[in-house]
Amino acid sequence: MLIQVCLYFYCKFLWRCLKFVMRKLTGRCELQRICYNTKPGASRTMKIETSLRDSKSKLLQTSVSVHPDAIEKTIDDIMELKKINPDINPQLGISLQACLLQIVGYRNLIADVEKLRRESYDSDNPQHEEMLLKLWKFLKPNTPLESRISKQWCEIGFQGDDPKTDFRGMGLLGLYNLQYFAERDAAAAQQVLSDSLHPKCRDITKEEISKFSKAEWEKKRMDKAIGYSFAIVGINITDLAYNLLVSGALKTHFYNIAPEAPTLSHFQQTFCYLMHEFHKFWIEEDPLDIMEFNRVREKFRKRIIKQLQNPDMALCPHFAASEGLINM
């Protein structure tokens, strides 16, 4: 442990020395070098974030958590601290502002998402009830809901006749995401729901078919289900999106698609993408039954994380929810 601590401080000392030498050689501070030598997007913003957070200056350390309204003043203070003339380096201020908006916006997005996750579904709250009924309407537009408490909820993938009990894990966040998907991408959501309700025929040769009676054939062709509970999976994928956000894995994606601060709409749009991609992944994995859900989900999670390790990566959805949000 002592050796590791000594090695850490030794490397930190060397890094500070290297930064000092680079400034003397180039005439530019680290922030200038990053902004001028790194293309906009996740690569630049993540380097700026690391540089600010690891700085010995309290001003630079706290700049990643200022209020959005204080960003302009913070940049002025940084320029003054670094003795950078804004008239000679106008682009630096613009680049730093874009990066700080993304960095601060990501932190605020986590807070907004966490607030929704912690808010429990309340059946006495008219707004909550209205959202739930809208979810049914968007997913089953041609089928009236007979009553608020009904077995019909199982048709869209809830576990019982009152969906409120299924929102316990993710709170209102699960409902917000499901409604967003069902409303903004109605065709895609209804197709995924339809697929989730139908079993997939197992591949059987003509020779095998000839050996079975009709009853045996029906049993054989239904023995490998593609089906899963749409709403429950949606809440589970909400959990996946939430953990990717909190862990920082989604920084790559958001810093590449949001020109300024990422918002709740960006998060919900990302949920739509994950739902769409998980559905395809589930079909590709060809699980024996729903008992393999955790295995498939974990494999899918690892694939998404691997994709997000690429600094140029953006989870680019190709459906309606992404329109107006992607700015590549």
Image (cartoon, rainbow, N blue to C red):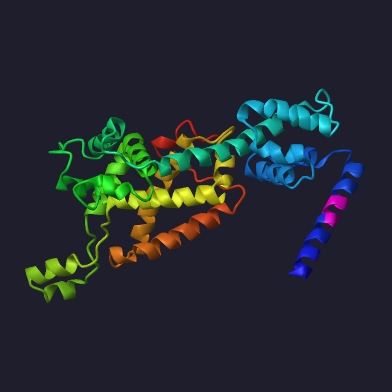
Residue 58 x %, y %:
76, 40
Quarter placement of the C terminus: top right
Asked whether, in this view, residue 322 is left or right of residue 12, the answer is: left
Asked whether, in this view, residue 35 is left or right of residue 273, the answer is: right
Residue 243 x %, y %:
48, 51
Looking at the image, which is closer to me, 223 or 3?
A: 3
Q: Residue at x 18, y 39 (%)?
A: 148
**Residue 135 on the magenta segment:** no
- Whether residue 35 appears in this view of the structure is no
Asked whether, in this view, residue 158 is left or right of residue 261, the answer is: left
**Residue 15 on the magenta segment:** yes
**Residue 278 versus residue 110 in the image, above or below:** below
Q: Residue at x 22, y 63 (%)?
A: 201
Asked whether, in this view, residue 260 is left or right of residue 149, the answer is: right
Looking at the image, which is closer to me, 85 or 276?
A: 85
| Magenta segment | 13-18
Q: Residue at x 54, y 57 (%)?
A: 306
For this orientation, the residue located farthest to the right is: 24
Residue 155 x %, y %:
20, 48
Residue 204 x %, y %:
22, 70
- Whether residue 57 appears in this view of the structure is yes
Image quarter of residue 48: top right
